[in-house]
Image (tube, helix red, strand yellow):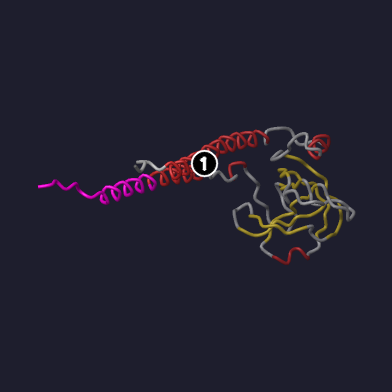
Amino acid sequence: MTRRIPIIPTLITAIGVLILCGLGRWQLERRAWKHDLITRLDAAATLPPVSPREFLAAMKGDISVQYRRAAIGCHAGPRKPYDLRPGSSAGGTSGFFVVVSCRPNDLPPDIVAVAGWTRRVDAKDSVINLDHEFAGVVIERPYGNAPDRPRFMLIPDAAVPPLGKPQQPRPADLPDNHLAYAGQWFGLAIALSAIYGLWLRRRSLAARSMVAPAVTPE
């Protein structure tokens, strides 16, 4: 006699549903973590400017200075930009951040500053006379974990003329798609359950249709 519910397909489907629901729950937990992070980063702007001792502690990974305000003296003299990175102006226009190293030598910098914003790709070849005091918001690991790259980037409130003012980063701009991702995982779990239910129903109907009606002898 054939079992009404097949064990192997049911077990595989149940495991799949549990995995999908687990991924949905994980995204909800990530959403709660992201909201807590945004709250803490919002509070970071109200803290005192980062001190040299705090920068050293952040270099060691003991503390975070993400989105803290800081000030650095940039007196490296005439030099070309360290890098050109995609960024927006204070008004929201897409373009490039002109990133400069404030070290007067050619050693890899621990922190770089955004001298300003531009639309010109050839700005990387322009010489900038760096003799400024920059004050703004600190971004940690602007190049990820790439070796020999700056650990911090300062996005200042003002720009070096004739460059435009760069857009300041805001914690609220951090991507927060976790609720949508959670909905997708839970939706897939529901869809998988529905598909398996339909398959079971068709299987049952097919089994019934194969059973020949009993013949009553005359």
Residue 198 part of the magenta-drawn span? yes
Report the residue marked by disc 1: 19
Kind of residue sitting beneath label 1: Ile
Q: Where's residue 154, x and y in %?
A: 74, 46
Helix, strand or loop at mark 1: helix
Residue 96 image-quadrant placement:
bottom right
Front-most of residues 73 and 34: 34
Magenta stretch contains residue 110: no
Instruction: Find the residue positioned furthest to the left.
Output: 218
Front one among 185 and 74? 185
- Image spot of residue 69 (x, y percent): 72, 39
Q: Main secondary structure of the magenta part?
A: helix
- Image check: 125 left or right of 77? left
Across the whole image, how many numbered discs are drawn on residues? 1
Position of the N terminus, as image quadrant, is top left
> Quick check: 42 left or right of 62?
left
The residue carrying pointer 1 sits among few (fewer than 14), some (14 to 19) or many (20 or more) residues within 10 Å by Cα, namely some
Residue 66 screen position, x and y as percent: 70, 40
Which stretch appears magenta? 195-218
The residue depicted at 81 percent of the width and 61 percent of the height is 80
Q: Could you tell me residue 182's position as x and y percent? A: 50, 42
Q: Is residue 126 above or below residue 66?
A: below
| Left/right of residue 134 with respect to residue 204 in the rendered view | right
Quadrant of the image occupied by residue 30:
top right
**Is 56 or 169 nearer to us in this picture?**
56
Task: Determine which quarter of the picture holds residue 3.
Answer: top left
